[in-house]
Image (cartoon, coloured by chain):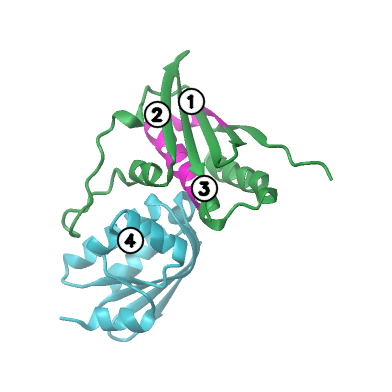
Amino acid sequence: MELTVEDLGHGCCLRLAGRLDSPGVDVVETRFLAAANQGRGAVLVDLSSVSFVSSMGIRMLIAAAKTLHARNLRLVVFGARPLVRELFDTVALDQILPLAADESEALQMAARP
Amino acid sequence: MSAPHEHLDIELDGSHAGPERVRRVVADFLSPFGLSERTLYSVELVLEEWLTNTLRHGYDDPREARIGVHVWLEPDEVMLRFEDDGREFDPLLEPPVAHATSLADAKPGGLGLKMIRRVASRISHERYSERNHLTVGVSKQH
């Protein structure tokens, strides 16, 4: 699992690549949460290069979102591949986190008041 | 060309790399059978969620874990059976976790079993010889 942090000026985009399962989360979680918390604005999470997500991956996303929420900041997830998105739908993740189809939509969601 | 073997037995130890090794062995075993990506994802999800759960909650020291994983194919399903000597645990007795409707309501636990229930076509559990025996079927989906 790899993590790339991209500064968007008004926020940041965290791009993940690989498998977001228990081993993958072990590799990136500390950096992921630290990068999310250092942001001054909304945090976008790019899952377009993530082939597999399990409950541990979802926990990591929710943990980051909760921390940002406490600072009145938003975390928006985008680019989930079809099978990952199906998994998100089975646990109604869209009730908990904003899920966008792509980066453009994610930026619009992040900008909403 | 001979038909691929339709039965796999692995023993997982409690080392950190154990679940990942099992995942790779099962993926290699299933690769010749032309299963859909959705079926393979569901199988990997069951492996990940159950093995993680067992190592985390079934033992005081997960390094002592010895978990047998058996995989075989039936006409319409991929079958997985897990056997462990950890604490007695029947997932079918766990109450379903309701969907959170907001970030504030979202709790960190319970998602793993929910996911197994969602992707499994059948689940059964027995406890005998001081071991948990969990059998999960995953439909061969298109």
How far across and down, in percent of the image, does residue A68 sit? 22, 67
Please rate how many residues cluster around mark 1, counting C-alpha atoms within 10 Å: few if below 14, some from 14 to 19, many from 20: many
- Is disc 2 in contact with disc 1, using a CB cutoff of under 8 Å? yes
For the residue pair A91 and A57, the one nearer the viewer reads as: A91
**Residue at the disc numbered 4:** A61
- Is disc 1 in contact with disc 4, using a CB cutoff of under 8 Å? no
Residue A7 in view, yes or no: no
**Residue at the disc numbered 1:** B84
Q: Which residue is painted at 43% across and 36% down in the image?
A: B122
Q: Nearer the viewer's eye, disc 4 or disc 3?
A: 3
**Residue at the disc numbered 2:** B58
- Mark 3 and mark 1 lie on one chain; the one further toward the N terminus is 3
Do tags 1 and 4 sit on the same chain? no
SS label for mark 3: helix
For the residue pair B39 and B50, the one nearer the viewer reads as: B39
Q: Residues under labels 3 and 1: Cα distance?
A: 19 Å
**Residue at the disc numbered 3:** B44
